[in-house]
Image (spheres, coloured by chain):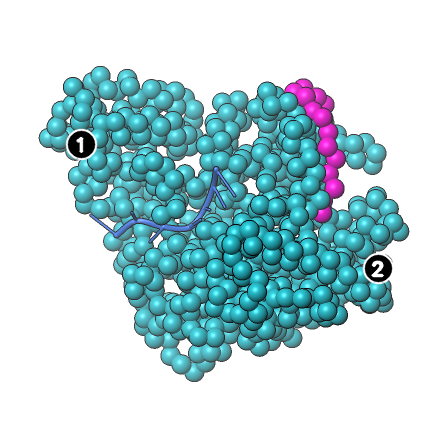
Chain colours: A cyan, B blue
Amino acid sequence: MPKNKKPRGGRPSANFEPRYGANKTSFHDRHNGGRDGARDTRDSRDARGGRADAGERRTPAAGYDRRPGSRSVGHRGYRPAEEGAAPKQRWSSQERAGRDESRGIRNRAESGRREAPHSRDDRPRYNDRSSAGFDRPRRDDRGGQRPTGPGTYRDERGGQRDERPRRDDRGAGTQRQGFRDGDHRDGGRPGRDDRRDQRSGGFRDDRGGQRFNRDDRPQRDDRGASERPRFDRAASERPRFDRDDRPRRDDRGAGPRRDDRGGAERSERSYDADRARRAFDRDRTQRSIEGGRDERSRPSTGGAYRTDRPRPLTSDTRGRPSRNERPSRNDWNATSSAAPAKKFEPTDDVVHERLEAKSVAAVEVDGVTFGDLGLGSNIVETLAGMGAATPFPIQAASIPAVLQGRDVLARGRTGSGKTIAFGAPLVERVLQSQAGKRREFGRKPRAIILAPTRELALQIDGTIQPIARSVGLFTTQIYGGVPQGRQVGALKKGVDIVIGTPGRIEDLINQGKLDLSDCRIAVLDEADHMCELGFVEPVQRILRHTADGSQKLLFSATLDREVAALVDEFLVDPAVYEVAGEDQESSTIEHRVLVIEHRDKADILTSLVDRAGKTLVFARTRAYADMLAEQFDDAGIPAVSLHGDLNQAKRTRNLERLTSGRVNVLVATDVAARGIHVDDIDLVVQADAPDEYKTYLHRSGRTGRAGRSGRVVTLITRQRQRRMTELLQRAEIDAPFENARLNDDLIEEIAGRMPTASDLTA
DNA sequence: AAAAAAG
């Protein structure tokens, strides 16, 4: 659907699949052949880890001279299919050789379509069409996957049978072991394979990330209660250097101080909020009128009609970023916390109008344990095994509310423990809801978790699955880009918690293969993102399939009124939480903006990523991401890319290459902006500045984890300065703008090849 | 512009 952006054969993996029209459209073939060839260069290089043959393969034309089938149908030199016979056999042996390779296993996940019979028939032709050497690597991918298919199924059944009885044994304390255990036995369990693959690299780090969050903890503890931008600004008491002066926050963290602020702040904030809100309303009203709509006139409780809100709301936000985005952030805080603000709510649709937001400070949850919050001992022990010994603020706040069955909105910045905040109580709820019941074969899922990207879905499952397993519940991942067979198989056997992305989930619902009618809990991670244009509608449709009155949990680091549409339609008297003191000064991220000449950009980028640590580069488009990765590679800096033009196997693989350290540079689109956890990224480079402050916050949140220092560099041209300034304001980030030229020491310093200014002063 | 579904 919208996924296909390319004129033809737009699927991400199209270049690795036989052309359906191979014998029909010569133009098509030539066209794609060329383009894919370029991409393939990267891939095959990836596969072999060397650049040497990339050059050869880059000129597939060489192969055309000798290979009979290499010409497409319309070509004079085209020869029909029979000639594929010989190559086919030869290829098969290649395939046999290749499929034993372990990397074949890794790619099993995406093998589905390639296993289709007609695909096989096409293969020889396909092979011949391109130069032989060029194609082989892909073959291996494919070949490697095929044989695992049946085996997978067997494993799946076997594993499942094994699994069930054993679950009971897996009591407290053995979480780790049980997990690892399950890992192996469980290979065929849907998603398990994928996860195991991931686990070899990428997604272990994600759980590790959780552990790191633990390390983070002290910092958050240090933070005082709800700090408002306004307060911070006014607080000249806090000199700038205080930013690094963590301990100081200790002092002010404790009760009295916070309470003081609570009082004083509140009124101030409300006032701010009202102003902001009114501005917001004004804008929106205007817009509605402009748009010929009169939604504003609807009463605030107007439920059903609200569904079409997201569109105007979103476009409004986009249309007037500078007016709306920042205010909306404030609003979120403000509305939620300020009852007195009511008099300023003339009309209707303030999202959090009837919500009482609670700002949770770490000090409030000191000494509280997960057990205190109402989680069962198995879950508590599992969490401990994952490194989550005691709850983070956002967890302490939301877990009891979730267990009470309330709808919850929660905002906590990246790495603040949101996944466990909804995951652990969700598991507990599901467990309680079926207490005493037998886990039936083919039971319907009881809970669903939606994420905006596949990687994030995988990652969430990586956190939740061990928790679920510890109490004998099953999770499965439902996302696109991989054959659906295994996912459907899992659903047939019965899973308790579904984690996935909207597209495939809706697809399976429509196919009648996923029944959410018994789904009592629905979670939206990155909820604000899921409410953006193009996302929100599938999400709404999916949520409507869940059980009546199902509990809804909305989480995001940048939760704001963009979720209004969903809140209005789906949430009932939600509890709203945020974590206190999440401002730049409590962050370990250093932000800088380099103002450069456009002609220097490429070289500066190369210079920036030519460094020891892991670097994540964000590009605006897929093509540019690819280009940059190749550019870095050509410069001798191993780099891979991550974006939606890659098939899922490559997405996974390339991400894994970064996490495993096989490369130090990953160039990604915003697919990696949210939720992707890789340890040790100490530099985020924004080759293209983001358009939205939220994007900035999420991208930069990929670094500075674990209390380590992280650095974010954004490259802009002079023309962009103003926009960038505004964006940073909205993000509430202070960053120096520095002019930089190609061989400036500045770049050396940022890349870490020179001591930084702070190093010198230290 | 990106993301999210294709036997």
Q: Is residue A456 above or below residue A71?
A: below
Residue drawn at point x = 73 percent, y = 29 percent: A738
Residue A127: image quadrant is top left
Residue drawn at point x = 72 percent, y = 23 percent: A745
Q: Secondary structure at mark 2?
A: helix
Q: CA distance from mark 2 to mark 1?
A: 73 Å
- Residue A733 belongs to magenta span: yes
Q: Residue flagged by tag 2: what amino acid is it?
A: Arg
Residue drawn at point x = 60 percent, y = 53 percent: A286
Front one among A313 and A411: A313
Residue drawn at point x = 28 percent, y = 38 percent: A17
Front one among A590 and A722: A722
- Residue A179 belongs to magenta span: no
Q: Is residue A701 above or below residue A515?
A: above
Range drawn in magenta? A732-745
Q: Residue flagged by tag 1: what amino acid is it?
A: Asn
Q: Is residue A555 above or below residue A197?
A: below
Question: Does the image show residue A505?
Answer: yes
In percent of width and height, residue A275 lies at 73, 58
Q: Which residue is mark 1?
A: A23
